[in-house]
Image (cartoon, rainbow, N blue to C red):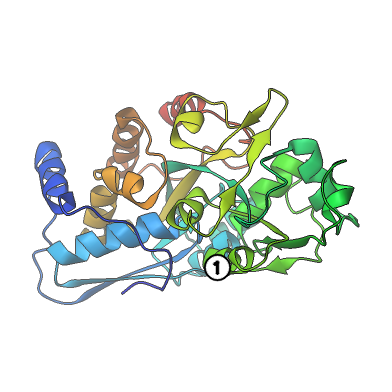
Amino acid sequence: MVANGVKANRFVKILGAIAATVAAVSLPVAVSSQTNRLIKIDGSSTVFPITEAMAEEFMKRNRGVNITVGISGTGGGFSKFCAGETDISNASRPIKQSEIDKCKAAGIEYIELPVAFDALTVVVNPRNNWVSSLTTAELKKIWEPGSTVNNWSQVRSGFPNRTMRLYGPGTDSGTFDYFTEAINGKAGDSRSDYTASEDDNVLVQGVSQDESALGYFGFAYYEENQNRLKAVSIDGGNGPVAPSRANVENNTYTPLSRPIFIYVSERAAQRPEVRQFVSFYLSNPQLVDEVGYIRLPQEGYTLARGLLERNQLGTRFANRNIVGVSIQELLRLEAQR
């Protein structure tokens, strides 16, 4: 069972591709016991579409396993995870020190696994015909703490005298943390007078119905709703760059490209169905493409499977500035563990 959310545009051939991939890596997929096994997952709405797709396909092949996927935001997900309420936590940023401490106090150890890259996307309504790009300085002017910008004419000379309404993730969201650090210079620093939600579908709905709106969320939610949204190119100092797979892979979509993660409870990973699900997750990156994110190079998934097989506990990415980190830098950090 999965929570309602953005649905993947699935191809008819996907099951065949999954079967071929699983066969190629010789991973055991079928869970032998016929007893209903429950895997509980919660956290990031950004990572949700990937995990939802993985869960759906895994459950098709393992009728005795039930997987629930919730959306509490990255911070809300870690609150449940560190209380022992979930087996896997979806995260659109690395675990924070306060969350590390909470998990440690509760005796919760974990395996940290990068699973994809995201092009965090700034969007406007398709009827907005005055903006095609924004600089990071203009985004900061709009979103920084204490900002009083509430009209498009305040953003740039030549923009119309139109009221601006803002939509963005709530404070439990890893997307909120990443965006505020990348744009405002410190995670959590943001104006608060905007429509906030940890569910990106709510933000999509708001921007799509409001000609004067501006919002931001994960790339998959934009790609799934391109007919209702318009992506804004971002100028980080070298000219406007659109959010796209190619621009994440060539490291030109900065500073809003970012790695996204799952965290697996060490205790839960001892259960066969959890370990097999995570192995399945790391062996089917075509589903990352299907739902609109950017898969890692194969080396990344090989390294991640190695972490799972070795039961490598802890974090390599916490307390580290990952704003603008490239896929190549991510792989280098992952290989050092």
Q: Which amino acid, mark 1?
A: Asp
Q: Secondary structure at mark 1?
A: loop
User: Which residue is at the front of the view, 76 or 225?
Assistant: 225
Say left or right for 152 vs 257.
right
Q: Taking 283 as reference, is 110 above or below it?
A: below
**In the image, is 40 to the left or to the right of 193?**
left
Rendered location of residue 166, percent (x, y): 74, 61
- Measured from the top left, where is residue 337 in percent x and y? 44, 31
Residue ID at (17%, 54%): 12
* Whether residue 56 is visible: yes
Q: Image point 68% across, 25% down: which residue?
A: 239
Residue 180 as seen in the image, left or right of residue 246: right
Left or right side of 143 for 232: left
Which image quarter is the N terminus in?
Answer: bottom left
Residue appearing at x 34%, y 38% in the figure: 304
Quarter of the view holding residue 217:
bottom right
Residue position for label 1:
199
| Spot occupied by residue 150 in the image (x, y as percentages of width and height) | 86, 59
